[in-house]
Image (spheres, rainbow, N blue to C red):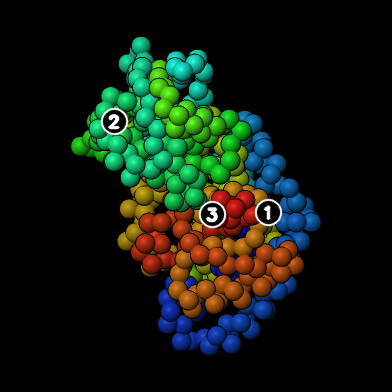
Amino acid sequence: MKFLFLIAFIHLLPQCTGKPLRWDDCHQHTFKEIKREIAGYSDIAKAIINLAVYGNAQNRSYERLARFVDTIGPRLSGSKNLEMAIKYMFSVLQDDGLENVHLEPVKVPHWERGEESAMMLAPRNHSIVILGLGSSVATPPEGITAEVLVVTSFDELQKRAQDAKGKIVVYNQPFISYKETVKYRLLGAAEAGKVGAVASLIRSIASFSVNSPHTGWQQYQSDVPKIPTACISVEDAEMMARMSSRGTKIVVTLKMGAKTYPDTGSFNTVAEIVGSKYPEQVVLVSGHLDSWDVGQGAMDDGGGAFISWEALSLIKDLGLRPKRTLRLVLWTAEEPGGVGAEQYYQLHKDNISNFDIVMESDSGTFMPMGLAFTGSDKVRAILKEIMQLLQPINVTNIYENGSETDTEYWVRDGVPGENPTSHLFLFNLI
């Protein structure tokens, strides 16, 4: 879980004598000189590794995270729990001795799922486990009772558009990868609404399931009727697909008490270690504090937030002062679509040339394998040399696609992006 300490190496390096790492005109340093300087940080790298893996900081980020999630619990956007979490982090970051700890106000969505249930009435009685999707509208109090239409893709839905009218559309799309398959969760309700469906149930976006539906945010379209939508387990989606393939009529009653409230005030949480030589230049590490309401948010994204904090703690504990400012941002309202990060970007984009690199840990905190990176080939070559400093813990690989939801705004504008990559995350990309 301490993988983000490699960020220390990145911002300790000179990076073309003060120019942002994304710039390709590093004419003041030949690549051979850069390699030599990177190798000169070997002792610092070993000190960070020893402190994180074997020293007094061993297990610290885990213990901090456990205390946090046990104390606060789930942290849905707009909820009191999320605001408690932000106040908690503001306090502990100050106690940790970090600099410029402050809160930046934003407006975030406030949606609550309420009571929800689904019952198959035909061909037999069966309780379907559901989780309403974020921003879904409610059903009428008595629910919606309708026949089911099972499809495997948006293309099939279009071909069977006449059959979909007045039906509950069940998507039983195959899992390809999260990036490819998540479109059904995001757009499933809107696409079903276009053809006159009364509700949609979407097979969870997961590579496997133990009768466990997964929630997430979904997106309505302004010119399409809003219909209730929820995720169901892989098992129930497959069962209804088998029934449908035999020509069996399926009838389901869906009840959802979801409510959407006006946007509410929240905060991005910021802390720094100020740079000694180029304090205006920023290396940004981050994770998001909000989570869904059906768990503690320990993995998504408590772990990412706390290892980002740990990166600063390790630098501080070793008495290191980076040349550039190392900035921690704990985003609010990532789950509704990176709302807090977008407002942070709008507030700071005028100074985008001061951002050398942006990183978010939001891909799971399992055994580390390397960095996912988006940026120029010249920067990638430099990062390959930096990653060699992590050979003692066998974490030297560099992969593609280093943008996450909260950092994509910067990456689209040309700032290099990174995120740590683990075994399970790669498995879900296969």
* Left or right of 342, for residue 314: right
Specify the label residue 184 is tagged with.
none
**Under tag 1, what secondary structure?**
loop
Q: Nearer the viewer, residue 180 or 114?
A: 180
Q: CA distance from mark 2 to mark 3?
A: 34 Å
Q: First in sequence, mark 2 or 3: give its number.
A: 2
**Residue at the spot of label 1:** 367
Name the quadrant of the C terminus.
Answer: bottom right
Residue at the limit of the structure toward the front, as seen here: 246
**Residue at the spot of label 3:** 429
Identified at 29% across, 41% down, the residue is 159
Identified at 73% across, 52% down, the residue is 57
On the image, the x and y values in percent for residue 339 come to: 38, 44
Compared with 200, 380 (above or below) is below
Select label 2 or label 1 by which is in front. 2
**Residue at the spot of label 2:** 163
Kind of residue at disc 1: Met
Select label 1 or label 3 by which is in front. 3
